[in-house]
Amino acid sequence: MVRSDVEGGRGAVASEDVVGSGSDSVCTSTASQPPPASSSSQGSGVKSAPSSVGSVSVRGVGAESSQPQSKTTTTTTTTTTTTTTHPMGALGMMQQVKGRQDFQRLLEAQQDLICRYHTHELKAHQCGSILLQQIKVPLPIVWAIVRSFDKPQVYKRFIQTCKITEGDGGVGSIREVHLVSSVPATCSIERLEILDDEKHIISFRVLGGGHRLQNYSSVSSLHELEVEGHPCTLVLESYMVDIPDGNTREETHMFVDTVVRCNLKSLAQISEQQYNKDCLQQKQHDQQQMYQQRHPPLPPIPITDKNMESSPQDREAVLKQEVLNLNQR
């Protein structure tokens, strides 16, 4: 476990190694706390405000002033606090812990894309994380599974059934998923926000349902990675969610991270099984093609009246002669 606390109200960034079966999995969590209010201002709520990556925006968004009474004027300033998660900081810490040069090259090459899609502005009552999963399978196979908005149960073990209630499975579609009985929830209604087949990015947002994860939104991106000469896939999944009443930030992180981590490990297993199945089918196809090239089918023996009238022994002799003639060619 490596933990780094950042002063100035940016919260804490935690990095934890999680060893998966057959794949490397790393979890990096970003927990954000609002900075203390100054002595000259009074906090009166949390609102979203634009902020640069890796910074905290504290901005006065309004002022109310009362009319002078006995020559006295009172002004109240509202302070808005927004914390922005910095994915590259979390991923950089992960890379230092793992010492992976292939991760470092990927992060440098796709830094703009990662920052664009995995940067979340968190309010004081929200938390978020970014998790990673390396899968030893080429990207197209993994993407074919992840992009299926209508079939999340293929790799998400906590989902029992899924039904598209609006749309055709593209951006803007809404699905209703029913969960297994072992989780403290019944169903979830979710909307597809992003589906980019070129950049391999998918994002959805929770609209409601029988659970406590309000305003949950998730972004997953797939990145090509070469490890020891073999094509692999690196999956990044980040999320943000409201902290439920009665739960702490750490409890929310622990629960949601566990669910996402299980989904990513399951995705790795399903992808590897599909890849092995495809490789086996391709091998069998190649072997069949090679056998047909080496052993072309025998031409059909013409049926004549003479052959039909002859005895079985005569027909067998004719067949052997035809085979002998073919071999002599």
Image: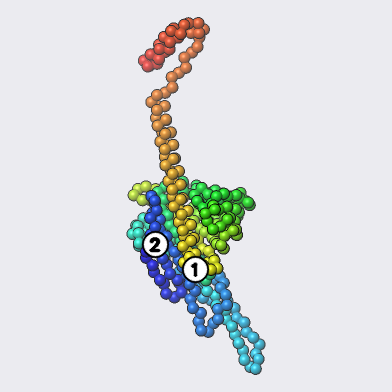
Image spot of residue 121 (x, y percent): 51, 67
Residue at figure coordinates x 43%, y 10% from the top left: 316
Residue situated in front as seen by the camera: 232 or 260: 260
Q: How many marks?
A: 2
In the picture, measured across the screen, residue 3 lies left or right of residue 303, that is left
The local secondary structure at tag 2 comes to strand
In the picture, measured across the screen, residue 100 lies left or right of residue 217, that is left
Q: Quadrant of residue 190?
A: bottom right
Residue that numbered label 2 is attached to: 16
In the picture, measured across the screen, residue 256 lies left or right of residue 229, that is right
Residue at figure coordinates x 36%, y 55% from the top left: 102
Numbered tag placed on residue 248 in the rendering = 1
Image spot of residue 269 (x, y percent): 43, 48
Residue type marked 2: Glu
Residue type marked 1: Thr
Q: Does residue 31 sit above or below 101 in this rendering? A: below
